[in-house]
Amino acid sequence: MVKVVVLRWGHRPQRDVRLTTHVALIARAFGADGIILSDTEDKKIKETVDKITRNWGGSFFFEMETPWKKTVRDWKAKGGTVVHLTVYGENVQTSDVLSRVRKIGKDVLVIVGSQKVPGEFFSEDVSDFNVAIGNQPHSECASLAVFLDRFWEGKKLAENFENAKIRIVPNERGKKTETSRRF
Amino acid sequence: MVKVVVLRWGHRPQRDVRLTTHVALIARAFGADGIILSDTEDKKIKETVDKITRNWGGSFFFEMETPWKKTVRDWKAKGGTVVHLTVYGENVQTSDVLSRVRKIGKDVLVIVGSQKVPGEFFSEDVSDFNVAIGNQPHSECASLAVFLDRFWEGKKLAENFENAKIRIVPNERGKKTETSRRF
């Protein structure tokens, strides 16, 4: 099965803490292998996300500081596909862009911006596809979640996360969790 | 066609400004009729969201201050369905909860919490359904976006927003917008 890694670009340590944390948790919950916080570091977010992975399972990685150019260059050198999520891109609903991404069948690096991104992100040198989760302004959280949900055809929301210490037992009413060293 | 309205509960004016703004923009972009910021006010967010609606079209409403109990009571009195998005709920992927919501065919009030919600949100007095967008911790933004995307079977991402002053022309490369008094 192909791998998906998220590249979070433009994180501003004070301003974007909560949104970047959400982006990372969405990446994990919706089946990405890991996230790269490019060109900067934020140890507190890494700590939060790593702790969730330890408790809730799986092998999600959180990497920091790598310059985005290096990540993209290395990714392409290995034959991977780069998808840039942007409101200006091809509409995931009205175009066939998602099936074109899938058809290539290679690992996917998903670029998610925070601030306004450099113009070159739109060019072929960086992105193989510019994908819009609708062409209305909303949220990088929503874009990433819906892209991954559709990319995996929903299946990742059913996934079991291995080596979890805690897990939720889905319930019509109230909260039910199970804790264990191993399930 | 049924209506969907989002009830944002537990907004904290300083801490949650950006996330609540994202929640509101997601509600709009993914086809809700409006959002109610319950039990509190935040004029700045309302201004931001109303401005986006003026420029990007549609008739999305942003209401503040109404106590959540009143909103829920009135909604139920009119025969509407209440869906509470929570990580503890029935899994949207592994259960038939979404088709049960759809089958009722009534307007849907979607409750999206911020802080830990009151226990009564899980009970029948408040929520007809507790729905989990997967049972892993992530983000209310992701939950709302994926719930609405699946609820409308993706169709709202193709929607034209009426009376827009600006709109994006989807593009494989670069940014393309059109501005007009009327399209």
Image: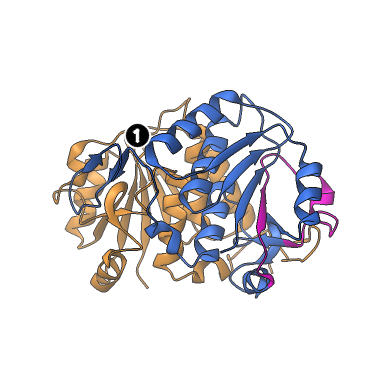
Chain colours: A orange, B blue
Q: In this view, does B107 lie to the left or right of A174?
A: left
- Residue A37 lies in quadrant: top left
Does B108 lie within the magenta span? yes
Q: Where is residue B3 in the image (x, y as percent from the top left)?
A: 60, 57
Chain under numbered label 1 = A
Q: Position of residue A78 (x, y in %)?
A: 21, 60
Q: Which residue is drawn at 79% across and 57% down?
A: A175
Does A126 lie within the magenta span? no
Amino acid type assigned to the residue bearing label 1 in the image: Gly
Q: Residue furthest front?
A: B182
Other-residue count near label 1 (Cα within 10 Å), few / some / many at <14 / 14–19 / ≥20: many
Q: Where is residue B13 in the image (x, y as percent from the top left)?
A: 64, 26
Q: Is residue A119 left or right of residue A92?
A: left
Q: Where is residue A108 in the image (x, y as percent from the top left)?
A: 31, 60
Q: Residue at x 45, y 45 (%)?
A: B58
Front-most of residues A46 and B14: B14
Residue B27 to residue A29: above or below: above
The residue at which mark 1 appears reads as: A10
Q: Which residue is drawn at 57% across and 54% down?
A: B143
Q: Is residue B53 left or right of residue B61?
A: left
Q: Which residue is drawn at 75% across and 52% down?
A: B75
The N terminus of chain A is located in which quarter?
Answer: bottom left
Magenta region, residue range: B104-129
For residue A32, say whether it is visible. Answer: no
Residue A5 to residue B37: above or below: below
The C terminus of chain A is located in which quarter?
Answer: bottom right
